[in-house]
Amino acid sequence: MPLECSLENEGWNREDNCMILYLIGLSLVELGDIKQAVAVSEEAKDVFEQTSGADHLDTLDVCRNLAGTYDALGRIEDAITLLEEMLEVKEEKLGTMHPDVQDDRQHLHELINQQGHMTSHKKCRKLVEWLSNVRKVF
């Protein structure tokens, strides 16, 4: 991404880039540019993983926000997968009773329920379509 290159050229190090990319991603969400927010947040996640490690709490925070951004785009499956991975690491680091872990678990359950409703709705719609096609035959 040109942003990272220009930051490095200005004397910013990779650790600075992590936080800057993370904040830009959050700002883009606030501005409603969700697609661009995903691109920047994915890059921030990659840079955090390279500089701090995949199990660093800052990296996990980026993952949580990226999952929320995926959710906003309707990419529920991606959001669930990322939250499950993040939650597993967070539980190991912080324990299952930590308030952040409990909040993340609640968010994951909400997404799974949301996905279940979407799947049920799709199944119902397919059933209605099938029934209307059957009626046409008779």
Image (cartoon, grey):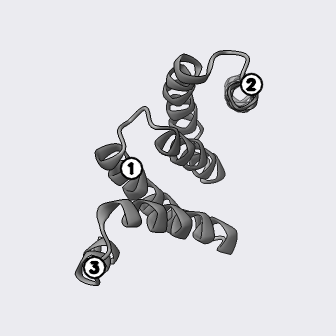
Give the amino acid type for the residue marked by disc 3 in the picture.
Gly
Point out which mark residue 48 bears: 1
Separation (CA) of disc 3 from disc 2? 39 Å
- In primary-sequence order, the first of circles 2 and 1 is 1
Q: In this view, does 73 lie above or below 130?
A: below
| Depth order, front residue of 131/37 | 37
Residue type beneath disc 1: Phe
Task: Name the mark on residue 102.
Answer: 2
Q: Report, in whole angstroms, how far the alpha carbon at label 1 lies from the one at label 3.
A: 18 Å
Q: Name the residue under label 3.
A: 11
Pinpoint residue 75: horizontal percent, then vertical percent.
56, 44
Gap between marks 2 and 1 measured at Cα: 23 Å
Location of residue 117 (image quadrant) = top right
Position of the N terminus by quadrant: bottom left
Q: Earlier in the sequence, mark 3 or mark 2?
A: 3
Q: In the structure shown, which secondary structural element does the residue marked by tag 2 occupy?
A: helix
Looking at the picture, tell me which residue is in the foreground, 89 or 27.
89
* Quadrant of the snapshot with the C terminus: top right
Q: Can residue 117 be seen in this view?
A: no
Residue occupying the point 56% across, 26% down: 90
x then y, percent, for residue 6: 28, 81
Q: Where is residue 125 in the image (x, y as percent from the top left)?
A: 72, 32
Q: Which residue is drawn at 55% across and 25% down?
A: 84
Query: Please, what is the three-letter code of the amino acid marked with disc 2?
Result: Gln
